[in-house]
Amino acid sequence: MRFDHIAILDWSAAGRPRRGKDSIWLGLAGPQGVTAENLPTRATAEARLNALVAEALAAGERLLIGADLSFGFPRGFAPALTGAAEALSVWAWLAARLEDGADNANNHRALAALANATFPGEGPFWGNAARAEVPGLPRRKPALPANLSEFRETDHACRAPGVTPSPVWQLAGAGAVGAQNLTGLPVLQRLRTRFGGAVSVWPFEAPDAPVVLAEVYLSMLSAEVRALCHENPAMVTDEAQVRLLAQALMALSRQDALAPLFAPDQPPALLAEEGWTLGAGQQMALRAALPATRTPPRLRNDCFAMPQGVDWVPVDEALDRLRAALHPVTALQTLPTAQAAGRILATDCTARRSNPPRPNAAVDGYGFAHAATGAGPQRLPLVAGRAAAGQPYAGAVPQGAAIRILTGAILPGGVDTVVLEEDTALDGAAVLFDGPVKPGANTRNAGEDVAEGALALPAGHRLRAPDLALLSALGIAEVDVYRPLRVGVLSTGDEIIPSPATPAAPHQIWDANRPMLLALARGWGCEAVDLGHVRDDAARIGKRLSEGAAKADVILTSGGASAGDEDHVSALLRARGTLSSWRIAVKPGRPLALALWEGTPVFGLPGNPVAALVCALVFARPALSLMAGGGWQQAQGFTVPAAFSKNKKPGRREFLRARLNAEGAAEVFKSEGSGRISGLSWATGLVELPDGALEVTPGTPVRFFPYAAFGLV
C-alpha cells in the first residue's frame, strides 16, 4: 500500500478567522519534501482539500488525507441519533444541520444540544461556553446516558505516558476536541460526496480508492514534536505535529510498510461504528519512521595525538588520554521499557508516580487507627468488608474499629496501623490482640521507595532486569536510550586461517582473536559487526576498513599494529588515516594503534591473543562504554593475598592471568608466555602488578580483577 502524497490536517473550531497557534494547519509530504500551510478559516481549508483531491485525481496519483478528528463516536451514539450503528450516518446527520460561515461563525453548540435531546437526562455533550446560553447544552460534565461510554476503544489504544485523548463529548475547556469533530466531519462528508467513489473513508470503507481519508492522532509523536519545537523555537506545536506525521507516513509509504497500520485487530462492527485511529497501538512504528535529526558527533582528527617527546605511556596516563579524547557517538532511540534491557539510558528517568502510590499494608492482618488502642488486651469491632490489593475499601473505618486487610491493600481512611494476622484472635465480631502496637506498624508509606518526580535512574545507566521492574512500577512506559554501539572486528595476517573448519598448514594458525573480540563486543551490549579476515595486502585492508567505517561506529583490529615489515595495519593507517601509535608501558601488550579511518575510530590491538584480550579489557572496554553513552567504566578490583612468588622489575604494569583458590588467595597461571591461550580460559580474572618494582611472595597483598569487573561474563 503506497501513496504519492500525504496530507495531515489539524482542525480548529475557532469562531473567527485565526492563524498561528490553535488554528488550522495542513502538513504535506511528497516528492518535493515536507511543507506546512496555515489556513485561517474552515472555508479556506475545505477549498484547499478539494483542490488537493482534484490535483491528485488529475495526475493519477494516490493521496492519503489524515485528519486529527474523531471519525466515530462511542458505541451506542450512532444508532440512538440516526437509527444506524454506522459512523458515516452521523457524518451525514451533522453535514445536513451544521451552519458554518466564511467568517467561521457556526452553530455547533446548537447542533450538540439537538443531539443531546435524543438521549435521556442531559445528554452526552457538554461545554456551553458561549455568552448566549444554549438550551440543552450543560456547561459542566453531566452523567453520561447508561448506554454510552466516555471513550472509544481506539482512544484507549492511543494512550501513552503523558498522552491522554480527550472525550468527544467535551466542547469547551482545556483539551476539548468535541467542537472540532462537529465542525470538521461535515467538511469530510462533503468531500466524499463531491468526489464519489474516488474517495474512501477508512476504516468504514476499504483503503483502495485513489484518495483515502483516515483519522489520525497528532499526539502520537509528542516526544518528537517537543524536540522539533525545541530546535525551532518559532515553530508552533500544531505546525510541528502536521509536519512530522506527514513525514513519518510518507517514509512508511516509501518502505511499503503502511499496511499493518490499516489492519487493526478489532471486530468489524466496532470499526463501522466507532472508527479507528491510523497507527493506534503501533505508535512505535510511526516514531521509528522519522529520521534522526542530528548527526552523531565525530571524533576530532587529532584526538589520539600524543604530545611531542612522549615515548612510553604509563597505563593510567593512557586511560586518562582516552577518556579525554572520546565522547558518545551513537544516536538516540525511544523504546518501550519492556524492550530496553541491556540498553543505555540517554536521559534521566524520573518517577511518573510514587511507589507505592498510596500508604498500604505490608502484611495480612487487621487495620485500625493507632490512637484508639493502648497497652494490654485490645478488642476492636470489625467493619463489614475488607481491603485487598486491587480492591480498595471504599469507606472509612471509624476510630475504635478495625478492618480485615491484606498485603498490598491501600490503607482505608481511618487506618494507620496494621496488626499481623498471626498475632490476633477473632470472637466472631471483633479482632483481639495484645497491645501496645507500634504506631504505623506493618504499613508502607506512600513514596517510601521512590517519590513522584524523583530520579529513578540516571542517564548513562545500562538497563538490567531489576531496572525494568523499577521503571515499570513507576509508570515509565518508554525510555530514551542510545542505539547500541556498532563495533566492527577485523583480523589480518597471512598466517591466519579464518575458520577452524578449514585445514591449516603447520605455518598457519586458526583465527582466535576475531571470535573472542566479537563475543566481547556482544557481552558489552554492543552490536558486533564481523568484518572478517584480510591477508597482509594494503589495498585489501584499506577496502575492508572503508567497508567497516560505513557499517560500524568503531573498529577493533588485531595484528599488524606494531612497526614491523608486515605490520600493514599501522602502515596503512599512517599513510591514509590519522594514526597515533601508543607504546604503552604494559605487559602483555605494549603496541596499541589508535587512529581515525574515514572518521571512524580504529583500535589496533596486538595480534597475540593474550595481549589482545588484556588490551581489550583494560583499554577498549572503558573506551567503548564511553562511546556507547554508558560513561567511563573503570574496572573495580579488590585486594587479596598472593598465592605465588614473583620478582617484578620496574617500568611496566603487568597483568597476570589468575584465579582465586579455596582460601581466597590469587594463584597465577604457570606460564606468563603470551602465546599460552589456555591460560585465558584457566583464569577467572587478572592480577594487576604496579608500574614499579615489587617482590611478591605468598601472602603479599595484590590487586585482583575478576573477569566480571571488565564486563566479561
Image (cartoon, rainbow, N blue to C red):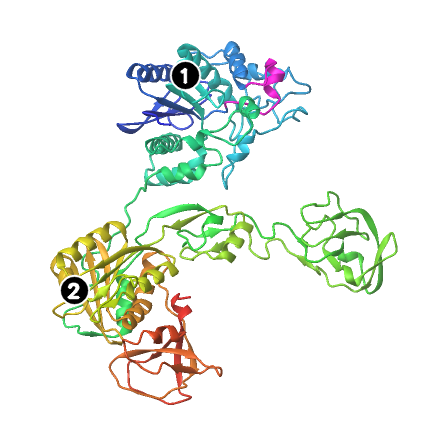
Point out the stretch of residues depicted in magenta. Answer: 71-86
Image check: 176 left or right of 712?
right
Q: Where is residue 672 in the image (x, y as percent from the top left)?
A: 30, 81
Q: Which amino acid does label 2 sit on?
A: Ser
Whether residue 46 can be seen here: yes
Placement of 598 over or under 254, stated as above or below: below
SS for callout 1: strand
Does the stretch in magenta take in 80? Answer: yes
Q: Residue at x 26, y 61 (%)?
A: 498
Mark 1, residues whose alpha carbon is within 10 Å: few (<14), some, or many (≥20)? Answer: many
In the rendered image, which residue does mark 1 sit on? 199
In the rendered image, which residue does mark 2 sit on? 570
Whether residue 558 can be seen here: no
Placement of 699 over or under 120, stated as above or below: below
Q: Position of residue 684 (x, y in %)?
A: 41, 74
Q: Which amino acid does label 1 sit on?
A: Val
SS for callout 2: helix
Image check: 388 left or right of 239?
right
Q: Based on the displayed image, in which of its 4 quarters is residue 109 positioned?
A: top right
Q: Residue 694 carries which label?
A: none
- Most common SS among magenta residues: loop
Q: Position of residue 618 (x, y in %)?
A: 32, 69
User: In the rendered image, which quarter contains the N terminus?
Assistant: top left
Mark before the other along the chain sequence, 1 or 2: 1
Q: Residue at x 77, y 59 (%)?
A: 421
Mark 2, residues whose alpha carbon is within 10 Å: few (<14), some, or many (≥20)? Answer: many
